[in-house]
Amino acid sequence: MRRTTKLLASLALSSALLSTAASAETLRLLTWGGYAPDEVVALFEKETGITVKVTTSNNEDMISKLRATGGAGFDLAQPSQDRITGAQMEFGIYQPLDLSKVDAAQIIPSMLEATRSNTALEGKVYGLPHVWGTSGLVVNTKLAGDVKDYTDLCKAELKGKVSYRLKRPTLIGFAFALGEDPFAAYADAEKYQNILDKVEKKLIECKPIVKTYWTGGDALINLVRSEEVVAAMAWDAGGWKLNRDNKDIKFVAPKSGALGWIDTFALPRKSKATDAAYKWINFVMRPEIAAKITEAAGNFTASAGSDAHVNEVAKAQLQGSFPPADLDNINWYPAVPAGLEELEGLALDRIKAAQ
């Protein structure tokens, strides 16, 4: 009798545990490395009781995974903002966001507006900003302090001392510095080609000034560190890394605007835990939590005021490179229409071949 009672009690306990496990909510997150550090996951799980399962990925892999399942398998994804509308139109892998469930006051307004605009389809928004970064100018201010915009890399007095990549960001950056708005011309291939022609002419004129067209970040860092290169077009993280060793080297937001990328929050079409997804978004956008993600990922987030909670060096670098006006002046990459990258590739080929 006692054995039977124990067995029944054991079965009841097992049933209760299974029931609890079955009802426990799980958030399946498809994201980039560093965007969901263990410390942040643990804090979220403790506060909400929601289990977080993290799968790290990249843009191409995210789209591939969601395309293969029709938007199933994950509850929250983090594609870059320029990879949302095209994938949605072609594969239908996302669902619109309910902005009433988002604490928008926690998000830097200019970044929120840029992402809402760049991820909108038929009046519905598919992305919210999370982690961001830019390309702009890395300048040895002691040796090239008057470099303020991309086209300053063509100054004759800097001959043999500048570097940039022959890639599309350089085309885009020089276009803005030449007074054009290439993003506004995305919908008009002829107008965009006219802008490319103007940029191509300028970059061919600049060829004698360039020491080398860099292809790897480490190589560029070594060139700037050794002062072989005193001004370059490069990413903010590289500039800040150099600044930690040499205070004269700074990442400078160009007068015409740094070029910015944003990795977003997007809801897969068949998400099974949308409430958990919104809770995660609101949680990680708290300034003190967002700062932990910055420390882990190395990039800042769109959380308003989070820079106050990061280490003093990173805080000073961000505030030095991006006063509020420069932060609001970032040119955020929109989705690229079909065919434009082919036009850019042809322009880059002609620049490479020019003597």
Image (spheres, rainbow, N blue to C red):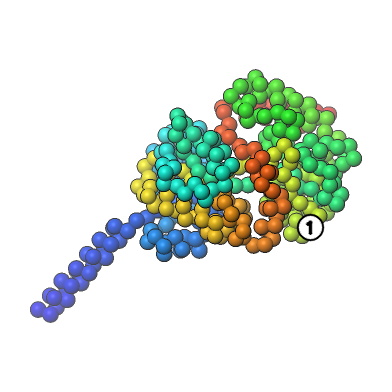
Asked if residue 10 lies left or right of residue 103, the reply is left
**Is residue 103 among what the camera can see?**
yes
Q: Residue furthest left?
A: 1
Seen at 51% across and 38% down, the residue is 116
Seen at 64% across and 42% down, the residue is 328
Looking at the rendered image, the quarter that the C terminus falls into is top right
Of residues 351 and 161, the one nearer the viewer is 161
Seen at 55% across and 39% down, the residue is 113
Seen at 79% across and 57% down, the residue is 247
Where does residue 140 sit, x and y in percent of width and height?
A: 81, 50
Residue bearing mark 1: 247
Q: Residue furthest bottom?
A: 2
Quadrant of residue 71 within the rendered picture = top left
Which amino acid lies under the numbered mark 1 shown in the image of this protein? Lys
Q: Is residue 137 above or below residue 343?
A: below
Where does residue 91 sit, x and y in percent of width and height?
A: 43, 33
Looking at the rendered image, the quarter that the N terminus falls into is bottom left
